[in-house]
Image: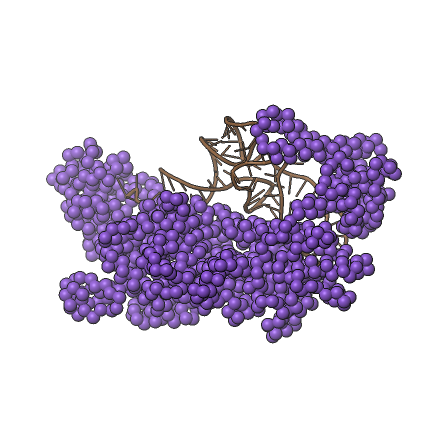
Chain colours: A purple, B brown
Amino acid sequence: MPEQTKEMTETAEKPMRRELPKAYDPAAIEDRWAEFWVRERLFHVETPSAEELEKLRAQGNDVFTILLPPPNVTGRLHMGHMLNQTEMDILTRWRRMRGDLALWLPGTDHAGIATQMMVERQLTSEGTSREALGREKFVERVWEWKRHYGGAILEQMKRLGASVDWSREYFTMDENLSVAVREAFVRLYEQGLIYRGAYIVNWCPRCQTAISDLEVVHEEQTGKLWEIRYPVVGAENEFVTVATTRPETMLGDTAVAVNPLDERYQGLVGKTLRLPLTGRTIPVIADEWVKSDFGTGAVKVTPAHDPNDFAIGQRHKLAAITVMDETAHMNAEAGAYAGLDRYVARKKVLEDLEAQGLLGTVREHVNSIGKCDRCKTVVEPRFSTQWFIAVNKEPRGGGDSMAELARKAVRADSEGKKAIRFTPEMYEKVYLEWMNNIYDWCISRQLWWGHRIPAWRCAACKEITVAREDPEKCAHCGSAEIKQETDVLDTWFSSGLLPVTVFGWPRHTRDLDVFYPTQLLVTGFDILFFWVARMIMLGCWFSQGLPLEDGSKRPLGESVPFREVYIHALVRDADRQKMSKTKGNVIDPIAIVEQYGTDAVRFTLASMASPGTDIAFSEARTEGYRAFANKIWNAARFIFMNVERAKEAGIEVDSKALGGVPSPGADAPLEARWIAAELHQTVEQINQSLSIYRFDDAANCIYQFFWGSFCDWYLEIVKLRLDFSTASAEEAKAALTMLVAVFETALRLLSPFMPFLTEELWYAVYEGDPPSKSIALARYPAQHYRIDVRDIVRMHMLQDLIRVAREERKNRGIPERESVPMLVTVSSERNFETDPNTLISENKKIIQSLARISAIRFCNAGDNRPDGVNWRAAALADIALVHEKTIDVPVERERLTREVAKLEKNLASAERQLGNAAFLAKAPAAVVEGLRKQEAENRVLLEKTRKALEELENA
RNA sequence: GGGCGGUUAGCUCAGCUGGUUAGAGCGCCUGCCUUACAAGCAGGAAGUCGGGGGUUCGAGUCCCUCACUGCCCACCA
């Protein structure tokens, strides 16, 4: 650790001296600030009283609540988290600085399967197992693990400076949240919307639990389609040939189905077949689901192992024979195959069929197979008893189903208003499409880690008792022989309730009144259905019963869990590949942060976060933004250096000028009025961009302002004003004050994007004693200075003149350090807001300094215009540099020729349009006018350039 | 099988409801250690906006079509 850093750490409160190191070293400051923000509870939000709230609203502000999508307790921070958090932090800091009551709520999710797997792995390495421990001990063990390692990701988040209210941190298995989850379950059960039943569900044989449709990922695979001949009973040489991709399941067949209209099988329906390898007999049935043109047109029906077959089985009252156990090994029903893994059994079944001559044609066949999202094991459809939420069922007594309510929340109402707005809007359609086709949600999981289902089964009457408090006896027959359901709830059930439960639901709390609905949800599309959709369903459902503050019934618009959803992109690697552990291309944000600094990484993500496109994270970009941070740092060094120098000369910056938005008067020099105008435009644009989640626009805008305008031009010009040998004390003081004020404003503007750097420099601006504890609590700049566009035009003219002069210097090979005289002929043909002569004279020093000109001589009206100089046309005037070195004729010829060609092309296009009567008649006046002006300018420029080329040839 | 995106400079991406000569960063070329910054400064080269057709006074922008590419959803054995 460098000496200075060490010293800073020791005096953490007021560490900012003005002797800043030459290069910005984020590592030297970031930890200190991250810790400071947490320790000082800077982002803690006290629930406001009614009066406070009223006051807040009276000033045009409001409550801004945002919920952190809770990462898994098992999680480590990845780039996706960092993008997500950066966006939320930018918005939260921005809203907070604008005066809103900004509450960002953090927490973690218990993540049922993931966490259980983690601990089970640990147990395995210790030579024991979940089963050996028993349920109670195992759960205690998971809690222990959670206490130990569960905070990792939030610690990383603290380090990144996320401005969340840590005092409100929650965990989805906290006591109060568990009570709420149980309440929600009981209510839904009482409303008849949670039911228990035996159906085919997706089963992961490795995790040994049911999983929902969403947790199954489909993959295309080339497999085989086998034809198997089933002999017809009573007709020795007759067969029905079925086609299947899963021959091993034939052991559980209870029928063969054909389409009722299929002529090939007309006579067979109703007949009996002998199921090979088992000897069982099964009927041939007719069902319209069967497609005659697929395979052989005859389908084996295995109700216990396929959802379609299950449906057929229901229609035809077929038995369901389960031939596999929960680990996907064949069970006793599979006879000789019992104990075999499903794929081993498949091989054996095929061999045996082959041996009996019952195997027909084998074809290649592409189909998609479902795999467990978590462990990629092939999912086995399994017939089992599970708990479901009836999302499409209307509640007793009428009303909308959960799904319908969730659709209404997103669809525009009759007045075109939407209770929840998606950005990008496209996701609204995706969401509705899904919600339109939603099936009942399987919420039971055969795990030990999670919210245990509050249902008890009576041994005596077999009835189920669901209760808020653990019951002692059966609610139906009074028997004490009751046992609690062993299953736990899907993790997403509890996280789907978060928007209400974090504020104390089911109790009607003041927090709910104040903070619900939350304003915004920022998340990736990957959990649109898992979480976003479930929150909308459950949030709308349960909050409808909560009256508003004034006691009135809560309308849908106030029932939604959030008013807006911003869906961000996926972070990919530099080659647009999805980051994954197996590919080994995962970029660890912490490693990048350590290398470039948090601010640079945040800025990278923000600047690349344009809606709709994935982010190909490139380190080159981050390197660029580290340079940007360094640029800001050095601008600060320059400013502080001048502040100190001025102090020595008895000039003090007027500190009253700081904290607002600089607004120079009409008597201020051009560059001051110009930079103020630019700053104000930047402020306006950033506020606008952030309000529509255009982080990229906002970031680019401030980058452009700070580097392109403030550093490249304003700082260079202001050096002149701070030169005490030529500038008056008054002039210097005004310039310095303006300089510091613009810089201070820029820091506040930049703060949501780069909180660390700006905090450090902001403290330094105020010599360690700023007006508030943190820049994050200062006011965000707002646009209110009346910009004079003419100042911007004037400055652009000067800049253009300087650029042309610089270019000419290069062309003539004038050494960088040498100053040369410049001749100027003002173009009287063109019309400017200010007389060009005046503009140039008044800003002579600027031109001289920035273009390294020793003296400017006006050669207007053709007088004293010397021969042998090379005239160049700038917008404001023609200029020539006096230098003995001759120009490089071939190079200059090429340049001029190119220039002429370009101008000719432009002119031709303008002329063509202006000669078009239809254009003149139909185009708006401003467009025509603009084109005319441009045409005139082009004509003059072309003439001059042609002449220059001619002179070059003659010389 | 449905649906939704994307295709603009060598690379990564902007370009709002069609309007004057299509932008940025990185990279590249040239010259500079100019007393804030070589993580810098100054200057420069570079695009027939995926192909084709249409609407329009005017198309990167709207429509049709084709190609390539990515993603989401789906119970065809």
Q: Quadrant of residue A452?
A: bottom left
Residue lying furthest bottom in this view?
A10
Q: Position of residue A857 (x, y in %)?
A: 84, 44
Task: Choose between A289 and B57: the one closer to the eye.
Answer: B57
Residue at horizontal 53 percent and vertical 63 percent from the top: A161
- Which of the image's four quarters has the N terminus of chain A? bottom right
Say whether residue A762 is left or right of residue A57: right
**Horizontal placement of A143 versus A262: left or right?**
right
Tell me the residue at 64%/28% (across/down): A914
Residue A210 percent coordinates (x, y):
30, 56
Q: Is residue A111 visible?
A: no
Query: Quick check: can you spot residue A730?
Result: yes
The residue lying at 23 percent from left, 48 percent from top is A310
Q: Residue at x 42, y 61 (%)?
A: A515
Residue A940: quarter of image: top right
* In the image, residue A102 above or below residue A400: below
Give how far across and how far down residue A160 sits, in percent.
Answer: 53, 63
Q: Is residue B7 above or below residue B37?
A: above
Quadrant occupied by the C terminus of chain A: top right
Along the viewing direction, whichever of A240 and A419 lies nearer the viewer: A419
| Residue A545: percent from left, percent from top | 31, 58
In the figure, A665 relative to A893: above or below? below
Question: In this figure, what is the number of numbered marks?
Answer: 0
Q: Residue furthest left?
A: A234
